[in-house]
Image: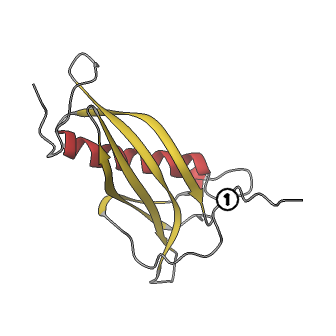
């Protein structure tokens, strides 16, 4: 029987965040699931917010999330963890921007950052009417 791995491997070579800091927040008790850990959906939303900030800077416009892929929930996040989301550019398409996002935490009474989640998020640049608009590779909107 072949074993299928659904989740990311428990160990990783990642020792430092890659990319630009997009957002930093503190995990609070209101953000927990039924097990008392931070709810994965909360973490995903923080990553999406950070990625949206990153993509909007590149697009110099509003952006909307159109896809999330390759999410790896590597370690749990706990109440009191300082959560930082870092992003780096994967690609710029005609109207889209794909960003690799990493969520890192610093646990209470610790100094070392730990990679807890990462994935690729794709955003589309939109105009004032909510319609997709072209983005050039250098981040300047084409007309």
Q: Position of residue 69 (x, y in %)?
A: 52, 45
Left or right of 140 in this view: 1 = right
Q: Quadrant of residue 96?
A: top left
Disc 1 marks which residue? Answer: 7
Tally of numbered discs: 1
Say which of 36 and 111 sits in front: 111
Q: How is the image coloured?
A: secondary structure
Quadrant for residue 52, please give it. Answer: top left
Residue drawn at (27%, 31%), measured in percent from left and top?
A: 95
Q: Whole-percent x and y of residue 58?
A: 20, 45
* Residue 20 coordinates in the image, percent (x, y): 28, 62
The image shows residue 50 at horizontal and vertical percentages of: 36, 50
In the image as oriented, which residue stretches furthest toward the top?
129
Tell which residue pokes out farthest to the right in this image.
Answer: 1
Q: Nearer the viewer, residue 97 or 57?
A: 97
Q: Is residue 81 left or right of residue 9?
A: left
Quadrant holding the N terminus: bottom right
Is 12 above or below relative to 76?
A: below
Q: Is residue 2 left or right of residue 113?
A: right
| Residue in view at x 43 percent, y 45 percent | 121
143 relative position to 92: left or right: left
Q: Secondary structure at mark 1?
A: loop
Q: Quadrant of the C terminus?
A: top left
Could you tell me which residue is drawn at 54 percent across and 50 percent down?
Answer: 70
Local packing at callout 1 (Cα closer than 10 Å; few below 14, some 14-19, many 20+) is: few
At a point 65% along the width and 72% down the height, the residue shown is: 10
């Amino acid at each position: 029987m072949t074993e299928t791995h659904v989740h990311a491997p428990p160990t990783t070579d990642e020792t430092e965040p890659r990319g630009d800091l997009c957002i930093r927040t503190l995990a609070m008790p209101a953000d927990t699931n039924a097990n008392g850990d931070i709810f994965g959906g909360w973490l995903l939303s923080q990553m999406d917010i950070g990625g949206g900030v990153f993509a909007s800077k590149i697009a110099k416009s509003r952006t909307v999330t159109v896809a999330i892929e390759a999410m790896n929930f590597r370690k749990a996040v706990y109440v009191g963890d300082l959560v930082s989301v870092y992003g780096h550019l994967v690609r710029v398409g005609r109207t889209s921007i794909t960003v690799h996002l990493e969520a890192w935490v610093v646990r209470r009474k610790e100094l070392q950052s730990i990679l807890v989640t990462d994935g690729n998020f794709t955003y589309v640049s939109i105009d004032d009417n909510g319609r997709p608009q072209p983005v050039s590779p250098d981040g300047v909107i084409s007309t």
